[in-house]
Image (cartoon, rainbow, N blue to C red):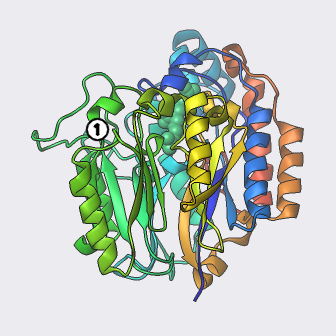
Amino acid sequence: MKSYEVNFDGLVGPTHNYGGLSYGNVASQSNSQQSSNPKEAALQGLAKMKALMEMGFQQGVLAPQERPDVAALRRLGFAGSDAQVIERAAKDAMPLLVASCSASSMWVANAATVSPSADTADGRVHFTAANLNCKYHRSIEHPTTSRVLGAMFADQQHFAHHAALPAVAQFGDEGAANHTRFCRDYGQAGVEFFVFGRSAFDTRYPAPQKYPARQTLEASQAVARLHGLSDDGVVYAQQNPSVIDQGVFHNDVIAVGNGEVLFYHEDAFLETDKMLAELDAKLGKRGGNFQSICVPRSQVTVEDAVRSYLFNSQLLSRADGSMLLIVPEECRGNERVWQYLQGLTSSGGLIREVKVFDLKQSMQNGGGPACLRLRVALNQTELAAVNPGVIMTAPLYGTLTQWVDKHYRDRLSENDLADPQLLLECRTALDELTQILKLGAVYPFQIN
Ligand code: SUG
């Protein structure tokens, strides 16, 4: 049976703004307080989805969340009508209002970890929503994420959903941003590669000195257990703590993999040779031929990688077996990175083409092409069981661009977040969206 990697991209929500909320994420910190353009952000994301669909890739869409999250503000003690909750938070605790308005759910690489049915003990596709508990504004995503994923992948015969791990730092889990799957074919058993930043319980593992390591080894192990993965099909590796301290807050900022290929920076991991040997041996046992492409620091520094998001690219397999790299415009703007990419595609290796996308609105918060997508490997039967409302088509693209044009503002600054009108605008837009995507009631304002 034919199998596919389906990319579900996060649709940018109407409150997209630069809140400076992510300590350790250089772009989020340096663009804090700038005014944003939510309309442009959503259209940039939709343009990428459309382009991939037109290139023949399977493409889906993942809905944004209800923001401002009034229910979250109520849990923090703000009371009264919805408008009063927002007014009071704006007056007494602006940082909490900003956090409750973040459109950060757009970076769906952090929504969940997904294991395809070929890897799991019960032969179903498994999803574990990420608790994202390192940052308050992201920790409030998972309940709605679970409802949206449940509405997209509802068929229990094919799909199994796990709630987020316990919401404590020891089980810090950032989802697919720290998870890669290698395989010979999407439908065959593969090797799932979990990259962690620190261990919560074992002091032998070093930790970064400056910025937080968001993913723990224990969280990755719990996800592998929940998904019923076998030890033969799992490899754990530690991220180099010194790159976390240079702004690599997720592994997908310094490495990307697909099929049999890992594309990574020389400084990305600890004990790299051991890790590569294990990947090679385990994939070999599953009929695969593991290949790695190491980008040397002499050609691209970690700083270049963080600024350009070279590794936050989408590595896609084409029908002829060659690969295509989807990179953000910032890669073209960095001379060393661009030169490296020219050399890579002309060397006769596997990666033959680079396509550049303008995702500046998301990039300014530290979210590149790979952050914006959640990969779900599905066979034909499973793909047919996905809610068809979320699969990208030319008519759906047209409907969603019109929906964005109708509902989104083209300028948003911190003061605007305190405007109760914004809440009404967002709810009206999202109510319409759940009908467009045929999701049913998934948002707190629709349920309570
Ligand atoms: O979690 N930025 C996100 C970016 C996530 C990128 N995802 C991956 N690498 N997969 C984060 O740091 C910034 C929000 C703000 O500052 O307004 C933010 O949440």
Spot occupied by residue 3 in the image (x, y as percentages of width and height): 58, 79
Q: Which residue position is annotated with label 1?
A: 240
Quarter-wise, where is residue 215 in the image? Answer: top left
**Pick the front one: 102 or 351:** 351
Q: Is residue 162 above or below residue 242?
A: below
Question: Cβ(mark 1) to ligand 1 < 8 Å?
Answer: no
Spot occupied by residue 114 in the image (x, y as percentages of width and height): 46, 63
Spot occupied by residue 379 in the image (x, y as percentages of width and height): 57, 80
**Pick the front one: 51 or 266:** 266
Instruction: Decide if residue 229 is in sight here.
Output: no
Quarter-wise, where is residue 439 in the image? Answer: bottom right
**Pick the front one: 419 or 356:** 356
Report the residue at 54% width, 25% height from top: 27
Q: Is residue 228 above or below residue 448?
A: below
Dividing the image into 4 quarters, which one contains the N terminus?
Answer: bottom right
Instruction: Decide if residue 299 is in sight here.
Output: yes
Amino acid type, callout 1: Asn
Quarter-wise, where is residue 261 in the image? Answer: bottom left
* Residue count near mark 1 (Cα–Cα under 10 Å), binned few <14, some 14–19, many ≥20: many
Report the residue at 69% width, 31% height from top: 361
Describe residue 289's horizontal placement relative to residue 258 as left or right. left
**Pick the front one: 260 or 124:** 260
Report the residue at 89% width, 40% height from top: 406
Q: Residue furthest top?
A: 91
Spot occupied by residue 343 in the image (x, y as percentages of width and height): 57, 46
Report the residue at 57% width, 60% height from top: 348
Describe residue 219's horizontal placement relative to residue 447 as left or right. left
Q: Residue furthest bottom?
A: 1
Describe residue 216's horizontal placement relative to residue 368 as left or right. left
Give the total number of marks visible in the rendering: 1
Element carrying mark 1: loop
Describe residue 27's horizontal placement relative to residue 218 as left or right. right
